[in-house]
Image: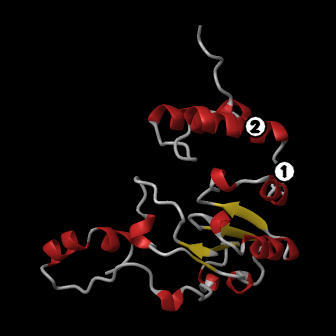
Amino acid sequence: MGGVYATLCPEHLREIFKNRIEIHQGLVSEVEDELPDYSLVPEWKASILFSSRGCIRRCPFCSVPQIEPEFKAKRSIRHLIYPGHKKVIFWDNNILASRYWRNIFNELEELDLEVDFNQGLDARLLTEEVALRIKRPNWTAEQLEMIAKARRVIGYWGAFPPYEGLKKKILTARNFKEAFQLRPPSK
């Protein structure tokens, strides 16, 4: 048995299965550069991949240091994009920490791919250069400023905490502005 649960809770598995199973903790390095067989799901049109593993941060609430203890980055992701896919979904924990992020972004532009940074981006590593490179998703200056203000007011360690009130506000919003607009300070 492997995966997140096996990596984080191996003792619980041993207790339940009384040592009748083999437990694999961490990643399986032999498959890190293998292209999944997307032909099994022909309706799926996006390549899911990691251009890096691990994270340079050691946030106290995060399990990444236990699952992926060493930060490793790929120089290229071209070989992980399935033929015909026009979208890439990054599952990196901290893609901007990679010293190869420029190479990766260049490949995305060359291949004219739509991009989803599914795990988000480390706001502490956002620079003007990064902002200009990711501008292709057509964010306006107003939207970027709204996100920045919301992160400063209700964010924690560069992320939005999953508070019920915050989740409800974002999930029930009719549009982007309603989701991230802050109330004026009360007097």
Q: What kind of residue is marked 2?
A: Glu
Locate the C terminus and report the quarter of the image it occupies.
top right
Residue 145, label in figure = 2
Whether pointer 1 and pointer 2 mark residues with C-beta atoms closer than 8 Å, the reply is no
Numbered-mark total: 2
Q: Residue 171: which quarter of the image?
A: top right
* Residue at x 83%, y 60% (from the top left corner): 133
Q: Residues within 10 Å of mark 1 (few under 14, many from 20)?
A: few
Looking at the rendered image, the disc whose residue lies closer to the viewer, 1 or 2, is 2
With respect to residue 72, does 90 lie above or below? above
Location of residue 170 (image quadrant): top right
Residue 66: percent from left, percent from top: 38, 69
Front residue of this view, candidates 128 and 42: 128
Q: In the structure shown, which secondary structural element does the residue marked by tag 1 occupy?
A: loop
User: Label 2's element?
Assistant: helix
Q: Nearer the viewer, residue 26 or 73?
A: 73
Mark carried by residue 138 = 1
- Give left or right: position of 44 versus 135: left
